[in-house]
Image (cartoon, rainbow, N blue to C red):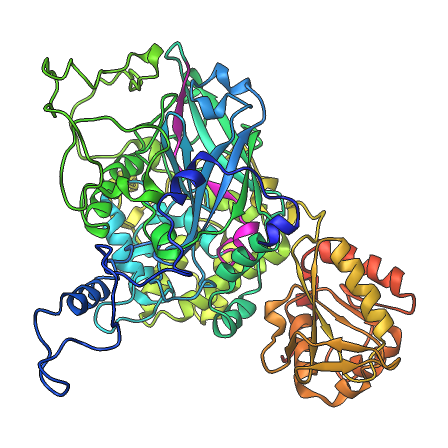
Amino acid sequence: MAKENNGKDKKKTLKQQQLESYTEENTGEFLTTNQGLKVNDDQNTLKAGERGPSLLEDFIMREKITHFDHERIPERIVHARGSAAHGVFKVYDNKLSKYTRANFLTNPSLETPVFVRFSTVAGSRGSSDLARDARGFAVKFYTEEGNFDLVGNNIPVFFIQDAIKFPDLIHAVKPEPHNEMPQAASAHDTFWDFISLMPESAHMIMWVMSDRAIPRSYRMIEGFGVHTFRLVNAKGVSTFVKFHWKPLLGVHAVAWDEAQKISGKDPDFHRRDLWEAIENGHFPEYELGVQLVAEEDEHKFEFDLLDPTKLIPEELVPVQKIGKLMLNRNPDNFFAETEQAAFHPGHIVPGIDFTSDPLLQGRLFSYTDTQLIRLGGPNFHEIPINRPVAPMHNNQRDGHMRQEVNRGRTSYQPNSLGGGCPFQAKMVEGGFSSHAEKIDAQKVRGRSKSFFDHFSQATLFYNSQSDAEKTHLEDALTFELGKVETVEIRKRMLGILTQIDTGLATKVADGLGLQVPARPEHPINHSIPADGHPNDYQPVKTKSSVATSAALSMANSPKDTIKSRKVAILTADGVNAAHVETMQKALEAAGAAADIIAPKLGIVEGKSGKEIPVKSSFLTAASVLYDAVYLPGGTTALAGNGDALHFLNEAYRHCKPIAADADASDVLRSTWFAEGETPGVFTGNDIKALAATFIEGMKQHRFWEREKMGKVPA
């Protein structure tokens, strides 16, 4: 494996050792049935004569066909399109022991195995990785005290406040039932009909219409637990907590035009990127952070901590970095591990507990119910990827696909015939005990008034974006609503946008050829109309204590590395081979990968006679699959090559760093961006100086200011 060659392979975790006992390698083995019977002939069905009918007694054929017929399990209703990896987590120190008794969060000597699954939300298993969508970020910690699943997203808030609306949300965003279109897209009538009637979705809409919804890589997204959870210490004292994952590579996105083209060129772009990075030893790393709020401070904010459509601005409660996650091994089998992995927000360990967040409460039921039908029954926890490394002892028995072979007479509690086993564990023995939250209330179907402000944080998010991010968000809303055929839905949504920012509403309305409504229609969902009359609807909007939040803009993401970035080097016969070699070495020393692209596969011959192997031709490569482009000298032939010029023009349009030797100017003059000083386009004669400047430019990821200079027709 490449990771072994990089000297980064570590001793096998307990979870890896456990999985290996289930791992099969067929090389050098005889073909057998599922019962271990060696098969003599796998080419022919048992027949009554060579040309006669097949016989029902052919148990080998029946077993093979039956297993094939059942190879596919029902895909996840949401998060169906996924990719995953194994890794390890270590906490930095024991400072969190003041707040929780969870051992894996307080013992820095422990290395906890993890399995992490990334995913899109709305699309099917066969959809594109680059759909505009939230991304799932689910982490299964195999702790010594049981499995803890932190089931989150790359966006810290959600569309709805109460789980009872989740089926409605998903029905609305999925392909429309009369024609099963569009796939993995929210740009259609039913979604925006629902959203325009659900003002609580306003904040989430800002996030999914932002560049966060089209990430460059799973290795470059943040992760959030979304809900407010509790940490509980050894004395039973509870502290509210929000969980965060911060990628060490920074948070980066692609352009929307680029995302659409990647979906055609390589719909597995994110899946391939994660797999190749791990195989090449570029192990993705994320720091785990927490925002802690004492119980006595629960009501000190202008928003409700239990409202999943709200976040806690980091200016109010800073994120404390407590540990690091590293993904260092790809799955051995996609179905057995990635597809059968069963995550559940109800899988917790002592020291972590729930709050009364109404969305979280519904998820605690929904996930179990989903796994029962998707994975065949109540024993999904016995599938190897889902088994805890902590021992399991209970009185649960039998059921579909039971693997545990239980011994003894008793399967009930209390008992005397079995010596009272298995015993209940006291808290001091590691037993879980739910936090003793005091509740004194009447049964109602309602919602707290503290959940009624749907727009303040949506405005905060919009105001916190850079100019380029605001433009992209405005364009995304215009694009999505432009796909909506029902004009009344567009108008209703513009009314919602006026409550977020009038300038935003005006720009979107202009793109749709509509007028901004004087006031929004009265939406449903517990908003308060003045005097109770819908025509006098006054949205609830409190004044935010934070005007802008730096953490909400990707423009403030760390930009200090080019590790694992991909660079296309465009070549042709006569290329300056020495400059190509120097640039390659500089990029690789900085952790990037450089691919040689040429008009055809094979080799290109440098002007010095040196032969350079070609990675891809212009037929199979595309600028959207790379982070930056280098054009060496001696490539005059490319000035008349339409594919090469398109490659450069498209990279420019998507605001990527471009470097070129000074004597490649004849090629640059043939592009659409040749004239004048251009941000992110670097030229020079000194190849070492050019490489250094290029690398610093690549750290910025994109030069979005180019968009103000007009679109390039690529």
Residue 643 lies, in percent from the top left, at 65, 84
The reply, left or right, for residue 487 in relation to residue 589 is left
Residue 184 higher or lower than 197, as above or below:
below
Q: Nearer the viewer, residue 538 or 114?
A: 114
Residue 656 higher or lower than 450, as above or below:
below
Residue 308 lies, in percent from the top left, at 37, 38
Q: Which quarter of the figure has residue 391?
A: top left
Q: Nearer the viewer, residue 325 or 547?
A: 325
Query: What is the tally of numbered marks visible in this picture?
Result: 0
Residue 259 lies, in percent from the top left, at 52, 67
Which quadrant of the figure contains the N terminus?
bottom right
Q: Nearer the viewer, residue 191 or 641?
A: 641
Residue 67 lies, in percent from the top left, at 21, 62
Residue 564 higher or lower than 165, as above or below:
below
The reply, left or right, for residue 375 in relation to residue 200 is left
Q: Nearer the viewer, residue 315 or 626?
A: 626
The reply, left or right, for residue 689 in relation to residue 410 is right
Q: Which quarter of the figure has residue 677?
A: bottom right
Give the magenta part as a residue range.
210-233
Residue furthest to the right: 686
Which quadrant of the figure contains the C terminus?
bottom right
Q: Which quarter of the figure has residue 570?
A: bottom right
Whether the magenta-drawn stretch holds residue 446 is answered as no
Residue drawn where x is 40% and y is 49% of the image: 202
In the rendered image, is residue 87 in sight?
yes
In the rendered image, is residue 454 in sight?
no
Residue 36 higher or lower than 9, as above or below:
below
